[in-house]
Structure formats: C-alpha cells, structure tokens
Image (cartoon, coloured by chain):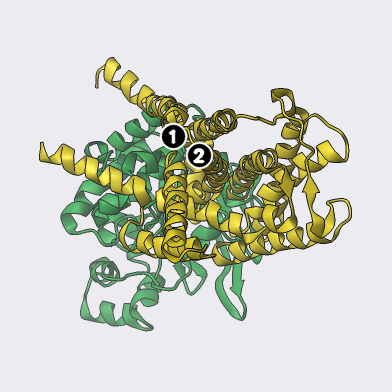
Chain colours: A yellow, B green
Amino acid sequence: MTRLAIRRLACGPWLSLAAAALLLAVLPALFASSAALNFLGFVMVIALAALGWNLLAGYGGQFSFGHAAFFGMGAYAMALLQVRLGLNPWLALPVAVALGGLTGLATGFLSFRAGLRGSYFALVTLAFAEVFRILANAMAFTGGAAGVLVPLRIGAAQFQFADKATFYWVALGFVIAAMALTRLVERSRFGAQLVAVRENEEAARALGVDTVRVKLKAITLSGAVTAAAGCLYAQKSLYLDANIAFGPWISVEALLAPIIGGLGTVFGPLAGTFLLLGLGEGTKTLLATLTGSAVPGADLVLFGALLILAVAFAPRGIMGVVAGAAARIGGAR
Amino acid sequence: MSAPILECRGVTMRFGGLVAIDGADLAVETGEITGLIGPNGAGKTTLFTVISGFQRPSAGRVLFEGTDVTALPAHRRAAAGIARTFQIVQPFAGLDVRENITVGAYLRHAARTEALAHAEAVAERVGLGPMLDRPAAALTIAGRKRLELARALATEPRLLLLDEVLAGLNPSEIRDMIPVIRRIRDEGVTILIVEHVMQAVMQLCDRVHVLAQGRMIAAGRPAEIAADPGVIEAYLGHGAAARMRAHGVAPSEAAVPAAAGGADA
C-alpha cells in the first residue's frame, strides 16, 4: 500500500463526519418553517441520547433499558442548578454532564462488578431509571409532581435561543462532537477492547483486557453523553417533570434509534433518529388529517413495527443496508 | 538449568464433590515445549484454566517466573506474560482477522498504528497474512486455530498455553502447523501444550507430563513416557501393559493410535 493510500484511509473516517456536519448545518436553510426547525432540534436531542446509548450497547454489547436515568439526571441537574442555586446554564452544563457520567459509573459499578450480563443488566438499568423517576416525582427539591420550570431568559449567555435554527445549530454541535468522540473511541485501544468485550468476554480476558474496567469506562462515557442530551432538552422545553425526564420513552427512543440506524456505528444513531422521528411525525400528521383528531400512541405502534422489521430484515440497521448496497454497486463494476 | 518459568505446586480443583485435579505438580522449563497429555476427562483443560487465571484452585499454588500468581486474575496474568488459546476456538466473530489479532497487540502497544503493524507481523508469522481482511467467522477450522494462536502471540507472551490447537485438523494441516509451533519456541517463547495428537506430541515436546483422573502419573522425555507401563494402563485400561508385553507389542506403537483418536471432554 502506498503512503498516500494509507493517509487517505486514515482521513476517510473523519472526512465523512465533516461532510455530514456541513450537510446538516445547511438543513435550516431548506426547512425554514417553525415546525420543521422544532422537529430538527428535537431530532438532535434524541440523536445525542442515542449516541450515548450506542457507546455502551453498540460497541460494548451492554444493552441498557434505562438510559432515562442518565438523560433525566442531566436534565434535572441542568434545571435545578439554575433554579435552586442560580448557576449560569453554561456552568451548570459541565456539572450536569459529569453527574450523568457519575450516575453511569455508579450503575456500572453495582451491576458489572456483580457480573450482571444481558437481560439481567437491562433489567437493573430499567429499575434504576424507575427509582429515579419515582424519587424525582416525590421529592420537594425536584419540584415533585409539578415539575420544574426554567425561567424564560432568552439570550446566548443564558443558553436560551429565540431562534429555533440557532438552537438546532448548537444541538448539532453537540451531536457532531459526540460522533467525533465515538469515532475516536472506535479508533483507540479502549474501543478495540470494548468491542472485544462485546464479541467474547472470555477471549478478551485471555488477551489481557480488564473487562470490568472497560465496561465501567464505557458506561461512564455513555451516561455523560446521554446526560448532555438531557441538558439540551431542559433548555429547549424549559419545563421538566419526572415522567418526561426519567420516563421510559427516552430509554426506548435512545435504544431504538441505534438499533434501526445501525448498532456500533458512528452514523447509525443519527440516521435511526431521523427515520424514527420522521416516520413518527409523518404518521401522526397523516392520521390526524384522516381522522380529524390526534391518535395518541400511533407513533409507538409504528416504532414497534419498525423494530420488528429492522431485527428481521436489517439486523445491521440502515448503515448495514447502505454498506451492503455500496458493496453491491462496487462489486457490479 | 535455570529455574522453571512455570510451576504448579499441589494444585487441587474441586467442583462440589468432584475432584477434577488432585494435588498436581508441574514444572515447565524455560525455552522448552512441554506437553500435557492424558485420557479424556483427566483434568488437562481444568489445569489450563487454573494456570491462566480463569479459575482459582481449591488448593495449591501457581508460580510464574518464581512469583506466586495464584490470586492474579486472568487479564493480569496476560499482562505478566502468560497467554492461552482456547480448546473450543473463541474468535471475535463479528470482527475481521486483523481486528481480532489487534486486540491482543493492544496489550503492549497503546498506539493504533503500532498495534496494527504488530498484528500484521504476527499474522505473517502464523501464516494468516493473506487473510487479514477476512471476517473471522469465514475462516476454516484450521484458520480459526491459527487465529487463536496469532491473538495469543500478539500479546507477546513469555509462556504460551496451547489447548489442543491441532484438534480437528487433518493430517496435512497438522504437518503445516507443527513447524509454526516449533518456530515460536525457537523465537524464545516457552510453550505448554495440551494435545491428543500423539504424533505431534512426540515430535514437538521436550518433556511430557501425564495427567490421569486428576493426578500426575508420569513425567519425562516423550520416548520414556510412551514406554511407561503406568501411562499405557491409564489409556488402555488395567492390565494392558502386561498383555502387550505378553503379545510382544512395543508399547510405544500401541499407545500412539489409541490416544490419537481421542477428543477431550
């Protein structure tokens, strides 16, 4: 192989990321309606949560059912640090992200050291998320069932944006950063060890991989990234309650998007979120115009159907389909 | 002679009421290929899991280069310089050959480019060079055995534990593999090998230990072991050695085909 070819191979993974960032950055110019911009901003929030989940499950094979715990921790920390302690949101953000990482570390410490794997691990994470939801709903500090309102103070210094496009660009920055982080992990020793743990834990140990440590690192990173999504959510809606921040809906969307988009890939979570939420919105709008009233839960039925289709026909998700098509085109030449 | 690189002293492994290994002593001399043989269910693989740190023995000690490693978990033993292969191959099935070997290479090379380069060099050494980009799941049995070997070698061990790397291979594949193993020894890696293919044991091993029903019953040069009445009885049953003498069969000839056909439990 020539040196140039090696250079090109090394740059390729970053080039595709930069190209995607550019493409996504011009989207507001094409879809300028308020509803479209709102939708795009929401896609970014969910994609960020999904990117967090993907780090642990897509690369490490540890399927969490309770990423709401990290999302909610980020969202509540962001909101409460502002409301209760008067912290500037830009200062609250790193604290909230760190708290999300710590929540991940604690969850991992309790489950991985006990040797929990597979469905047992999934159930424990689900239980953690539910405990947080119930606590947030009951405690006075979190505003109880009434939730928390972040006071409206529009301005970049307050992390509140009057223009929906600006919020989208900020959120896109987070998503691109998380994708770059994923790419870095993918190309590092830690990433190789994480994938080895996913593929075969015994064999990984035989090759000197400290599997518990690798999994703890992964769940900490994963919790931090998903907590960042919670922070964005708090600043986007300026209102939280326990069922929003710690509700099962976010755990489900954070795992469905990467599964449909492509597990253990950099682009999978984002592609999956676009498809999932796009089809969900489309169905809701279509049914609403057809029946004359909203049909609650129609998008959830669709998500279920999508999951079945993905598992049955595209186990490697959208990215797998794309890679397969590219290989066929390349092979046909 | 220098001190042995590996020593097992009185290693006992109980599973409930079953004693899989009963006070086994074993010494592996630096720079040699030591064989560990024995009938099916003798406890060979169990002893391997104890030496590699996947199981703590119920009693006894494991010493590596003079240091007690009995309490060290598997990944720390790999870091100390003990590598193992699995009898039932355990490839990272979703990864290609290069990625598989690189996981091992990362143990001593933190940088990606160095780890990749080292993995490629190891692949060449075991004859996997042309298959670097193949998915591990697409390899033949012989290919998977080589992959097990390559991954373990990529951790740059001083002691390599090979658990039946020749099992399931056809005679020509075995002939191809023997020089590969010998070359690894010649490059300075001490090898402990569990093997049922007697032809390979006889050709490769400097010294052989025999485990039967959890006890070490013999140790010595391959030719001595093949002629040992106790060993023949362990394989062929009580009284076999005496009957063979009566019929004028050279014991080493009889033991070889009988033992070669076995697949370990």
Look at the numbered disc 1 and give the secondary structure of its residue.
loop
Left/right placement of residue B40 relative to residue A194 reads left
Q: Chain of mark 1?
A: A
Residue at position x 37%, y 67% from top? Answer: B228
- Compared with B17, A83 (above or below) is above
Residue plotted at (79% across, 48% down): A148
First in sequence: mark 2 vs mark 1: 1
Give the number of the disc on residue A31. Answer: 1
**The residue tagged with tag 2: helix, strand or loop?**
helix
| Label 2 sits on residue | A40
Vertical arrangement, residue B29 with respect to residue B217, above or below: above
- The answer to whether marks 2 and 1 mark residues whose Cβ atoms lie closer than 8 Å is yes
Label 2 to label 1: alpha-carbon separation: 9 Å
The chain to which mark 2 is attached is A
The image position of residue A155, as x and y in percent, is 71, 25
Task: Tell me where residue B98 sits by quadrant.
Answer: top left
- Of tags 2 and 1, which is closer to the observer? 1
Residue B28 visible in the current orientation? no
State which quarter of the image contains the C terminus of chain B.
bottom left
Q: Residue B57: which quarter of the image? A: bottom right
Can residue B143 be seen here? The reply is yes
